[in-house]
Image (tube, rainbow, N blue to C red):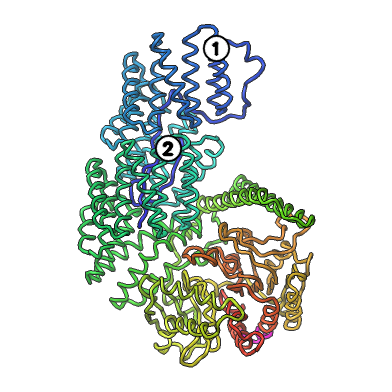
Amino acid sequence: MTVLRRTRRVEVGFFLALLPASVCCRGEPDSTSEFGQPKEVGPPVTSEVGGSEPGALIDAAEEVYFTGHLDSARTLLEIARGKARALGETASEARALTWMGIAEWKLGNLNRARSFGEEALSLKLESALDDQLFMSYNALGLVAWHQGRLATASELFDRALEVAREVDDAEGVAKASGNLGLVFTDLGEFSRARDGFLSARQAARSAGNQRLEGNALSNLGMLSVLVGDPDGAVPRLQEAREMYRAADNPTGELHAMGQLASAYSALGDLGRAHAVLDTALDLARDRGLRQEEASDVELLAELYREAGNYRRALELYAEARELNAAMGLPIETGADLRSEAEIYATLGELGSAALKARQALEIHRGVEVRQEEMLDHLALAELAQLQSDSTAADQHLLSASRLSQTLGTRASRVDVALTEARIAEHRGDAARVLSALDPVSEDIGRGRFASMWEAESLRSRAFARLNDLDAAVAAGRRAVSAVERIRGNLGSGFLRMAYASARSLTYSDLVNSLLRLGEVEEAFEVADASQARALYEHLVLEGGSEFGVRPSAAELAESEKLLRRIDQLVESLDLIEAEAADAAETADPDAVAELASHLVRARDRYEAHRLSLAERHPSAAVLSGSGSARVRDVQRALRPTELLLEYLVTPERVFVFIVTREQIRVAEGPISAENLRSRVRLARDLLSEPASHPERQQAVMGQLHDVLVAPAARSGALYEADQVVLVTQGILNYLPFAALRDKVTGRYLAQDFSIVRVPSAASLDALRGRSDVSATGSDGAVSATVLVPFPEQLPASTSEARALRRSLKVVTTHLQDRATERQARASLEAGGYVHVASHGVMNARNPLFSRIELFPGESAGSGDDGRLEVHELLGLEIRSPLVYLSGCETGLGSARATRFSQGEDYATLAQAFLYAGAGNVVATLWRIHDEGAAVFAERFYRHLGAASPGKALSRTQQEMMEDERFGAPYYWAAYQLTGSGLLN
């Protein structure tokens, strides 16, 4: 089920929506006055307050309000109200109550805001305080608007507008007109909304108020995005931002930035959306306002959702929903529920999805927000179809279509058409797919890349089903081009890879159609474009900087601050557990759980911060979208006796591209993606234990050989090859190819070939072009560094060190307290082989914190805490041609124990070392027996003296097979080599 989006209600916040549908922030309301930038002043609640007059206290409270100290303003207003009541000053009491309501509104306490506002209005009406009525009507209208009481909000803003016109208050007219426009926006009456915003702009201009004019422009931009004209929104929002700057109103500028991000997102320019939002996010976090907090949490949820980390996105949406519900914001609460429903549907949890979607529809019906109702019906239509209830699907689709006709917007038409096309595809009705999309072709084109990729993907599959292959290829090329355009604007390799992985079907559809037309070379290049290209793109960046443009001192300081916080939490956890161990008792579970929770949140924030840095400082080389393979370049990089096998897993089959220096062929493995996933899981379960049903092992590995290797063998390409270069994706990244077994000959793949892995075919040429890695010193002798931080825990690790000394002439060994993180960094950057015999720890929740365990140094706070983590590796300049990670699961990504999902392999320790500059990395796929690891390492280095890393690895595996102690695949099949396969 493709994600459907909703309008986000944001007062002075922002929201990123990465969508093919209508996406924008909610408009900027006009309150009684602006909420200024917090200044470096303290709350002026002093002993002198007690002697002040009510009017003076209210004036002081207003000033404090503008500094952002809302709690202090509220305290002053309470004192002023008490004094006014005691003195019988009704006007002052009403004024104080009005401001108390405004302060509570700003803090998100809407019920209290309403109570104070209604009490103030009652006083003003009783005492004929006509000059104060506008403030009350406008403030109460804002509360009603936020609570989803749209009819009441409209009445209150109408009354405010009437009062403002009676006293010729141009600013009041601007505020009330703009706020009415927001109500009409939520009601789906977009023509009336536009009229309201235009009236607000005209009145603001006549009053000479740039802030109010900026609000009107910002809301006009918001409306343009909502109705499907993001191009028209950008200049208005840029003008609004300049007006806010001129008016010294940073809060308004934040709102304009959020709307700009929505416009860029709708245009498919996610890099610029991220860059704009990042600055706004940092500023908004410091305000302590719950509405902005909810918006921020939703932003993070959307980022994780688009990146394919659905479980994390669900957690964040639930958090935002609780915040919105606590503030009494039904529209936002329902929108969060719908987002959760869409994610549950993506995960296949249809029962949970349907429950959430129905709750969202019930909420939105209650407040009569037609745009949201339409999106709820579309979500329920797809869910019903996924549950094979075509009647319910058609009913929901009809309801959504009627609401769309009422709304009359481009975006709503596209939403309905895409949903109808997806449902038709699910039913196998290709003609209806095309008939649903054809009427909105122009609308989709106006929305540019954000919706184009999906529409063209649907068209491509429909044409292929109708055997119109030329049309299928043309549509498929447009779809891939749209995905690549959006992907290329993402500054971080993680998001670029994850974005493409989440849309892998778009690539595989085009590959399938191209192959049916006999276009093998283009099909191969498209297949490689769907692979993990973060490594390749990093290698082609000029200057090697991760960010292209260096982060500012403030940005780096924020990184250090977050890391220090993480280190403190880790140390606190270690201390609790150590103290419990010393006292021979169990650590306090509540204390451990609380610290662990804080640690997870701190790591989440660091990962989000690092992601935002990459988005703010993208490299021009990455933005160019380079990174797809060219057949001739790949063939040139291959050695005469090498063969490259690249796998593309599609829902129905596996394509195997077979590339040699002379030719390229393709074969098919007749197995579905789901069946393949099940078999690989079973294979790993069987092989990752020393003695686990050898007959079943052989049968399962034989079946997988038939699907993955036999097609290449039947092509004849394997006859003259002695080394296989593998490019795999998804579930195949976790399969030990060395243990694939030919059922005819009874031989394992590692007995006939050496095996080298690369993340993509495009990266092979780049890896082999590296010239800054070296294993030899000035005397020409091969040098190596061995780090053994825990010889007592891993007794055989000292044997590994001795093995290197026997095999190589120049070996430096660092044992126990000498095997520090700082020493590891220095060794990696100095060149030569680096062998680390230690633990590898995978962090599935926060992959950037997966790590190699080393001995803590004396100055742990300066990057020597004993945890060499992925985020630290990415900042190193490694010059080693070979890094050998003799640890536990050092070749795995975050999916090792659960879903084996695409998009998660960016965090493998092995690829992190390659990313940082290593030429080759030996790593493992599961926990290795300590003694077996020592024997394997000794034999590997002995062979390495006369062979390439790939051949040394395969010869070692062959020797282990023949050793009665270590013959089971458990001892040798987990080892894999990733990298160039050569030693420069």
Residue 108: give x, y in percent of width and height: 48, 32
Quadrant for the C terminus in the image = bottom right
Of the numbered discs in the image, which one, if any, rests on residue 107?
none
Q: Amino acid at mark 1?
A: Pro
The single residue placed furthest to the front in the displayed view is 585
Classify residue 195 by image quadrant.
top left
Q: Is residue 583 above or below residue 654?
A: above
Residue named by callout 2: 10
Q: Foreground residue, 485 or 88?
A: 88
- For image coordinates 49% across by 13% down, the residue present is 93
Q: Secondary structure at mark 1?
A: helix
Residue named by callout 1: 54
Neighbours of disc 1 within 10 Å: few (<14), some (14-19), many (20+): many
Q: Foreground residue, 530 or 269?
A: 530
Magenta residues?
942-947
Q: Amino acid at mark 2?
A: Val
| Residue 278 in magenta stretch | no
Neighbours of disc 2 within 10 Å: few (<14), some (14-19), many (20+): many
Query: What is the C-alpha distance between the residues marked 1 and 2?
Result: 34 Å
| Residue 944 in magenta stretch | yes
